[in-house]
Image (spheres, rainbow, N blue to C red):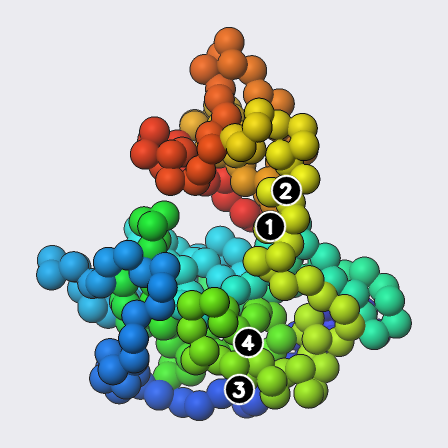
Amino acid sequence: MKPVAFVLSAKLSRIGRKAGAFFALAIFSQLPAIAFAVTGPERDQPAIIEGSGRVVDGDTLDVGATRIRLEGIDAPEMAQTCETATGKTWACGKVSAAFLRSLVQQRDIACDRTGTDRYRRVLANCFEDGTSVNEAMVRAGMAWAFVRYSREYVTVEADARARKVGVWQGPAEAPWDFRHNKWQLARTTATPGCVIKGNISSHGHIYHMPWSPWYDRVKIDEARGERWFCSEADALAAGWRPAAAN
């Protein structure tokens, strides 16, 4: 059975607890903000963001003009691969994004804003027809519980592990380890400490992280104004934007 078919065979009826978006707001407002939320909801911003979702990757989506990072979960990066139980490689990063797309694309969703991370993304718990999208990703084995910042989905992840669905059907590298290893590898060939590639193209000023699917293809031409960045915060402050994952 192909990995995509295996993953998408998970039934939405098993996704998780149902809860209305406003009921969720009451519940989650009692939980501590996760560590990478540098600010809480601002007074002039809506607590609930509603609209149609457009997927960026397995844990990031746009609702209207707002970029949202799903709180408490970490999905495999787009360039990341995992293994099946028989040792075959499958594109778990792309499949994770496709699964999120099946949950939110062209559907009305409501996202409970909990804060803003240091990369200016809104942190939120999102719901589609009362179903927690964050939890759905973990329950289907399409994302890890992001235990560094939240333990909200630890039990859900344990259930997915036991059922051997998604990334748990075979060996898989946690996305935070994948990013760390890619960063370390990039440091061996890039300017010491500065491994983020700032590329200028027809799409504008775009920066590529070492785990970007296009990172190895991008060549920096400083004569054209292209440059290296030492941190993502520096790239954002300079007015560059992240490369689209899809």
Q: Which residue is mark 2?
A: 184
Q: CA gap, disc 4 to disc 1?
A: 21 Å
Could you give the CA–CA distance between mark 3 and mark 1, rounded to whole angstroms?
Answer: 25 Å
- Nearer to us of marks 3 and 1 is 1
Name the disc covering residue 105, or none. Answer: none
Instruction: Give the amino acid at mark 4.
Output: Val
Is any part of residue 23 visible from this angle?
yes
Which secondary structure, mark 1? helix
Say whether disc 4 or disc 3 marks the residue closer to the N-terminus: 4
What kind of element bears circle 2?
helix
**Residue displayed at 83% across by 74% down:** 85
Residue bearing the label numbered 1: 180
Q: Which residue is mark 4?
A: 138
Q: Earlier in the sequence, mark 4 or mark 1?
A: 4
Residue linked to disc 3: 155
Q: Furthest residue to the front? A: 192
Q: Position of residue 188 (x, y in %)?
A: 67, 32
Q: Is residue 83 left or right of residue 63?
A: right
Q: Mark 3 or 2 closer to N-term?
A: 3
Q: Quadrant of the N terminus?
A: bottom right
